[in-house]
Amino acid sequence: MSTPTFMNIADNSTTLQNWHKHVNWLNTFFILGIPLYGCIQAFWVPLQVKTAIWAAIYYFFTGLGITAGYHRLWAHRCYSATLPLRIWLAAAGGGSVQGSIHWWARGHRAHHRYTDTDKDPYSVRKGLLYSHFGWMIVKQNPKRIGRTDVSDLNQDPVVVWQHRHYLLTVVVMGWAVPMLVAGLGWGDWWGGFVYAGILRSFFIQQATFCVNSLAHWLGEQPFDDRNSPRDHVLTALVTLGEGYHNFHHEFPSDYRNAIEWYQYDPTKWAIWFWKQIGLAHNLKQFRANEIEKGRLQQLQKKVDLKRAQLDWGTPLEKLPVMEWEEYVEQAKEQGLITIAGVVHDVSGFIKDHPGGRAMIQAGIGKDATALFNGGVYNHSNAAHNLLSTMRVGVIRGGCEVEIWKRAQKERVDNGHTQPA
């Protein structure tokens, strides 16, 4: 008797009869249900100035638990941290109410390995809203998510403990601690619970979700455009520096997201500070040479794309070969001129020649290489480019063409971006 196979609900179409089975109700409760309660409760709980300041401080506190802890320490191993720092980051990250370290890092590693594919757990190709938080609200088939190695996480006692006691971490760090500080500090128990607890965790959730959605949609791609990650200062501002996402996907083990001094990356600064006081070490950085190679390669792709849209004349290998006598004969009627073994039809340019008709007419039917390259006037880069659009043939022999090719190579080596 064969063993029956069971289809995951995520593989079935959503209907009016089974839609509730497609919803991950636990995640929906934490992501939408509790924040909705907080918003309603805020109508009856006034926001005190001290509580607002505390909520902002705790926002950064728990935000670093995600950016410096969940993301750069555990998901990417960008640096090493002492046990006290790891415990602190695990507690702070739990206060963000975004799942355990193990669950979060496993999904993020799959995202990097399978970016923009069906194995990416929050692929932006499935829609901006889906990559923002829809992937957590709607059930996924775990077998369809890309496989990743999490053996290092299984051996970290801090990660293992937090995973086993995740709900306790959420209750204590997500809601109890912010309420206790506000309550014992200035008597605002409900304000601490609603604003520093519930609504603060909602905002840090949405900020982190922007890395999965907004950072794959808004901004530039200075290092690689084959996938969706992008760099944008707005995303960096709302995610404690995680918005330079194109750089991050190219160099994921670098402890920095922002490499320029003026770019906003408080997570990088925090990790650097922890190193100075002995809490962190082995901060990883890609060599500047490799980073600049990636930037230059992407710039070259953009230049090549732009170049392909311009008229650079018929390639030499596609031009007809002419005998010298044939060239001289046709030049009398067509207004042909030869420069470096390449025949150009300048009949339509004679009247517009900046040097006057006489100069250009003097070279018709002759080898005007010396005249063009300094014998009479050393023509500009623009003149070389314009001349290339007038090519109509190549003089048989090849010697002149080889001289032309060497001359063009010298021009490129001397700083001209394109050969004539």
Image (tube, helix red, strand yellow):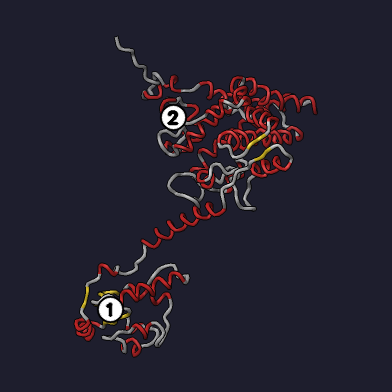
Q: Residues within 10 Å of mark 1 (few under 14, many from 20)?
A: many
Q: In the rendered view, tell whether residue 270 sits above or below residue 398.
A: above
Task: Find disc 2 in the rendering and name its residue.
Answer: 145
Q: Amino acid at mark 1?
A: Asp
Q: Quadrant of the C terminus?
A: bottom left
> Is the residue marked by circle 2 packed among few (<14), some (14-19), or many (20+) residues within 10 Å?
some
Q: How many marks?
A: 2
CA separation in Å, label 1 and label 2? 62 Å
Label located before the other in sequence (1 or 2): 2
Which corner quadrant of the image does residue 77 belong to? top right
Marks 1 and 2 close (CB-CB < 8 Å): no
Q: Secondary structure at mark 2?
A: loop
Q: Residue 294 placed where, x, y %?
A: 49, 52
- The residue closer to the viewer here, 196 or 121, is 121
Residue 345, numbered label: 1
Image quarter where the N terminus lies is: top left
Q: Position of residue 413 (x, y in %)?
A: 45, 69
Q: Callout 2, which amino acid?
A: Ile
Q: Residue at x 40, y 88 (%)?
A: 376
